[in-house]
Amino acid sequence: MVSVAKSFDAPIKLLFPTGNSTRPFSMLGLGDIVIPGIFVALALRFDVSRGKENCYFRSAFLGYAVGIALTIFVMNWFQAAQPALLYIVPAVVGFTAVHCIWNGEVKPLLEFSEAKPTDESQDKVSSHSDEKSDKKEE
């Protein structure tokens, strides 16, 4: 995996200088940013949909930072390349899950959807509201 990533010269990786002459660069794949980034973005959208403070976004982003730090720690401890998603994804999901459980909002988070209602469901809603207004008039 590492040899393929090192030999492939395309914008799919980020190289960071380390100051170590034996390993002059540390590498992070764009998948290690994009995949957890989608989860963090969805956490932000959940916060915005509720009209509340960005609490789930902050916990997901903190989980991402902890996952990156853990990856760097393990990589330096074992002096070997590590798959970053192995540490980032559980950290992001774990921090968000703990926050969700702590606040008792598991069901709203799991049921979150931005899907727009279809025409049939809009018709049902409008007919239901018409029935209520008819009953009030009587």
Image: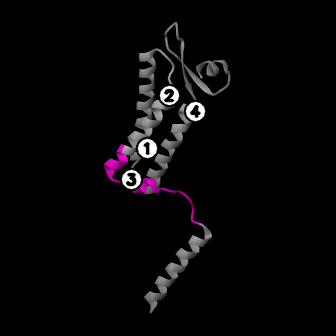
Question: Depth-wise, is mark 3 or mark 1 nearer the camera?
Answer: 3
**Badge 1, how many Cα within 10 Å: few under 14, some, many 20+?**
many
Tag 3: Cα neighbours inside 10 Å, few (<14), some, or many (≥20)? some
Q: Secondary structure at mark 4?
A: helix
Numbered mark located on residue 84 in the image:
2
Q: CA distance from mark 4 to mark 2?
A: 9 Å
What residue lies at 45% left-to-right and 31% top-to-bottom? 87
Question: Closer to the N terminus: mark 1 or mark 4?
Answer: 4
* Secondary element type, mark 3: helix
Where is mark 4, residue-wise? 31
Q: Which element carries disc 1, helix, strand or loop?
A: helix
Residue 105 magenta: yes
Quarter of the picture containing the N terminus is top right
Mark 3 and mark 1 lie on one chain; the one further toward the N terminus is 1
Quadrant location of the C terminus?
bottom left
Task: Give, as a three-letter code, the residue at label 2.
Answer: Ala
Tag 3: amino acid: Val
Please tell me how crowded label 4 is: few (under 14), some (14-19), or many (20+) other residues with Cα within 10 Å. Answer: few
Q: Secondary structure at mark 2?
A: loop
Neighbour tally class for label 2: few under 14, some 14-19, many 20 plus, Cα within 10 Å: many
Q: Nearer the viewer, residue 56 or 84?
A: 84
Determine the CA span between mark 4 and mark 3: 28 Å
**x 63%, y 28%: residue:** 12
Residue at mark 3: 106
User: Mark 1 = which residue?
Assistant: 57
Residue 24, compared with residue 43, is above or below; it is: above
Q: Residue furthest left?
A: 102
Q: Nearer the viewer, mark 1 or mark 4?
A: 4
Region in magenta: 98-117
Tags 3 and 2 touching, CB below 8 Å: no
**Is label 4 in contact with label 3 (beta carbons under 8 Å)?**
no
Mark toward the start of the polypeptide (4 vs 2): 4
